[in-house]
């Protein structure tokens, strides 16, 4: 592996790893860009186009998921606002006795929407984490085959199980440890590899 490629992958994975540090989490964006450039160079060097495409999809999945989630939140917000306006209008037009109105009726409509929104967001996030973990496991197996470093295979298992266990938040820790192993793996890989 060329020194430039090794540097891009090492520094990129390190910056991704620092995403959880408050105040500097923005560096993960730089890390992702550097990592993708390094993976592209490596995939060309080893003539494995799937390596780059799988990695690219693994990083695009959270972006696509975020856009879908924003759309779902927008739709639910419009539905909730329409329900509140409709309920208020119905009460006013029917000479509804406001003294007998329970404010809990309005909150029950809103509470149902919020619970549904949280459930949809949790399920969507979990599915995306599983897809991310599966893609990163494939990337890790390819890296282990090309670079002969067992850290990548172990990281792949952590990404896979991290995706599945993300529903109980243990997965985030496993994925972080996977990126730690990536960082160690890229810094320790020989430039003669690949």
Image (spheres, helix red, strand yellow):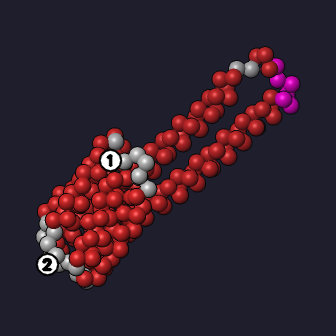
Q: In what quadrant of the picture does the N terminus appear?
A: bottom left
Which residues are drawn in magenta? 92-97
Q: In the displayed structure, would residue 47 be above or below residue 158?
A: below
Element on which disc 1 rests: helix
Q: Residue furthest front?
A: 23
> Do we see residue 57 in this rendering?
no
At numbered mark 2, what does the secondary structure look like: helix, strand or loop? loop
Q: Front-most of 28 and 128?
A: 28
Taking the magenta stretch, the answer to whether it contains residue 96 is yes
Q: Give the residue displayed 39% in from the left and 68% down from the top.
A: 33
The residue carrying mark 2 is 192
Q: Nearer the viewer, residue 188 or 51?
A: 188
Question: Mark 1 = which residue?
Answer: 172
Circles 1 and 2, Cβ within 8 Å, touching? The answer is: no
Mark 1, Cα crowd under 10 Å, few <14 / some 14-19 / many 20+, is some
Residue 193 rendering spot, x and y as whole percentages = 15, 76
The numbered dot on residue 60 is none
**In terms of secondary structure, what is the magenta stretch mainly?**
loop
Q: Could you say where residue 100 lies in the image, as x and y percent from the top left?
A: 76, 16
Look at 19% across and 60% down and name the residue there.
184
Residue at horizontal 52 percent and vertical 52 percent from the top: 69
């Amino acid at each position: 592996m060329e020194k430039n490629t090794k540097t891009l992958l090492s520094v990129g994975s390190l910056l991704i790893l620092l995403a959880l540090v408050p105040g500097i989490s923005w560096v993960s964006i730089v890390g992702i860009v550097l990592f993708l450039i390094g993976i592209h160079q490596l995939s060309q060097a080893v003539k494995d186009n799937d390596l780059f495409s799988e990695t690219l999809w693994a990083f695009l999945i959270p972006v696509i998921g975020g856009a879908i989630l924003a759309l779902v939140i927008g739709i639910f917000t419009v539905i909730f606002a329409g329900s509140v306006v409709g309920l208020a209008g119905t009460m006013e037009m029917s000479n509804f006795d406001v003294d007998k109105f329970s404010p809990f009726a309005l909150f029950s409509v809103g509470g149902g929407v919020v619970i549904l929104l949280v459930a949809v967001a949790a399920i969507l996030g979990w599915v995306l984490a599983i897809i991310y973990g599966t893609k990163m496991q494939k990337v890790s197996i390819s890296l282990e085959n090309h670079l002969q470093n067992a850290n990548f295979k172990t990281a792949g298992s952590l990404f896979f199980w991290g995706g599945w266990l993300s529903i109980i938040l243990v997965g985030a820790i496993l994925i972080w440890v996977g990126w730690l192993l990536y960082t160690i793996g890229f810094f320790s890989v020989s430039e003669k590899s690949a």
